[in-house]
Image (tube, rainbow, N blue to C red):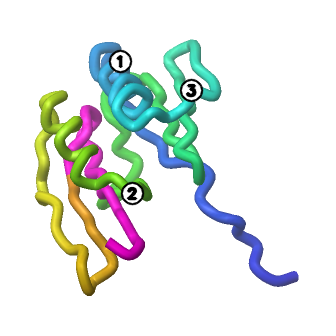
Amino acid sequence: MGKLAKGIHHVSLKPGDQETFDKAVALYRDIFGMEELRSGDGRAMLDTGAGCVEISLGEGSNSLGAVNHFAIATDYVDQIVEKVREAGYKITVEPRGGGESKVRIAFFQGPCGELVELYQEKDL
């Protein structure tokens, strides 16, 4: 039968209020340029190009489990960090790597408390 998994379909974020929901949708749609595939009734599904970010409004934050972070593949770590910083989000790890390591990364904390890694892998 071979490999049963085809990849990650989506990462789910569960903001506890409308303001945080709106901030989360704006971050991933407007700063990252993710296409809104579906939205309505307190839900939004945004296309990363290799999976989705699902944002679902609900009572309180999601406490069913913990995800340390999720990584978004990009060729623009430094540019995104500046946009995210300008939007008021906390950069938890400044851009680092590159050169011989062939990987450049940075981390920030999103509006739902999620930790997001920006991951650039190529000849830098």
Mark sitting on residue 22: 1
Instruction: Name the N-terminal-most of marks 3 and 2.
Output: 3
Query: Residue 108, position in %: x, y?
Result: 20, 49
Distance CA(mark 3)–CA(mark 1): 13 Å
- Observer-nearest of 65 and 119: 119
64 above or below 34? below
Q: Is residue 48 left or right of residue 23?
A: right
Distance CA(mark 2)–CA(mark 1): 26 Å
Q: Could you tell me which secondary element the residue under label 3 belongs to?
A: strand
Residue at 58% x, 19% y: name it: 39
Q: Is residue 111 left or right of residue 75?
A: left
- Observer-nearest of 82 and 19: 82
Residue at 22% x, 52% y: name it: 78
Residue at 26% x, 51% y: name it: 115
- Observer-nearest of 61 and 88: 88
Q: Determine which residue is flagged by label 3.
A: 36
The residue stretch that appears in magenta: 108-124
Q: Determine which residue is flagged by label 2.
A: 75
Q: Please name the amino acid that badge 2 sits on.
A: Asp
In the rendered image, residue 111 lying in the magenta stretch gets the answer: yes
- Mark 1: give few (<14), some (14-19) or many (20+) Cα within 10 Å: some
